[in-house]
Image (spheres, rainbow, N blue to C red):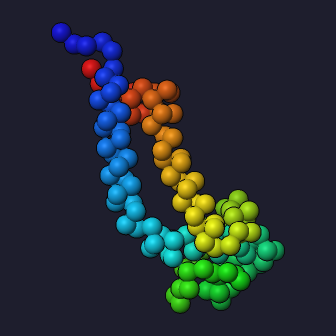
Amino acid sequence: MTESRPRTVEAWIVIAGLVGLWVALGSRTVEQARTHDFLALYTGAYLTSHGRTAELYDAAAQLAGGEDPGAGNTELVPFIRPPFYAAALAPMGRLPYRAASAFGLRRRFAIFAAWPGLAWRRFGIMGCGLRCG
C-alpha cells in the first residue's frame, strides 16, 4: 500500500541537507570568486556605468579594473560577455568593489535559497515533478 500524500517533512530535511552542503562547499570558494570571477563582471559594469563603454574590451582598461579594482589582481581577468550584459550590470558598477561583491553574493544566495519553495509550489517536490510517497 502506497502513501498518497507527499512526505513533506522528509523532503524538506533532504533540501536543508543539500543547501547546507552547498553552503559548506561554496564558502570555500568565495575569496577566489570575489578576486577573480566577480572581478571580470565588475570591470564590465564599472566601465559601462562610467561611460567608458568604448574601453570594454581594451585589455589595459580591463587590467586597471576601473578606479576601484578592489581585488588587486596583477593578471588580466577579461570581461568577455556582450555589451548588453555589461549594460545590465552597470548599476552595480556605481558601487565600490567590495560592496558590489557582497551584494552579488547575497543576491545569488537569496535566489538559491528561494528556489526550493518556488519549485515546490510550481512543480511539486524538487522542481522536477517528483514526489515522495
Q: Residue at x 34, y 57 (%)?
A: 24
Query: Which residue is outermost to the right?
Result: 51
Left or right side of 113 for 91: right
Position in image of residue 46 (x %, y %): 71, 73
- How far across and how far down the image is residue 65, in percent? 65, 82
Quadrant in which the N terminus appears: top left
- Where residue 116 appears, as percent x and y from the top left, is 45, 37
Q: Quadrant of the C terminus?
A: top left
- 52 vs 116: above or below: below
Q: Is residue 128 above or below residue 64?
A: above
The answer to whether residue 26 is above or below residue 33 is above
Relative horizontal placement of residue 131, taking residue 97 as reference (left or right): left
Residue ID at (71%, 68%): 95
Q: Quadrant of residue 78?
A: bottom right
Q: Is residue 132 left or right of residue 128?
A: left
Give how far across and how far down residue 27 sits, in percent. 40, 62
The residue most toward the left is: 1
Q: Between 60 and 115, which is closer to the camera in this rendering?
A: 115
Quadrant housing residue 52: bottom right
One can see residue 44 in this view: no
Q: Name the residue located 51 percent from the left edge and 41 percent from the top edge.
A: 114
Question: Number of marks in the image?
Answer: 0
Within the image, what quadrant is residue 66 found in?
bottom right
Q: Does 34 appear above or below 110?
A: below
Is residue 95 shown to the viewer in this render? yes
What residue sits 32% from the left and 52% below the top?
A: 21
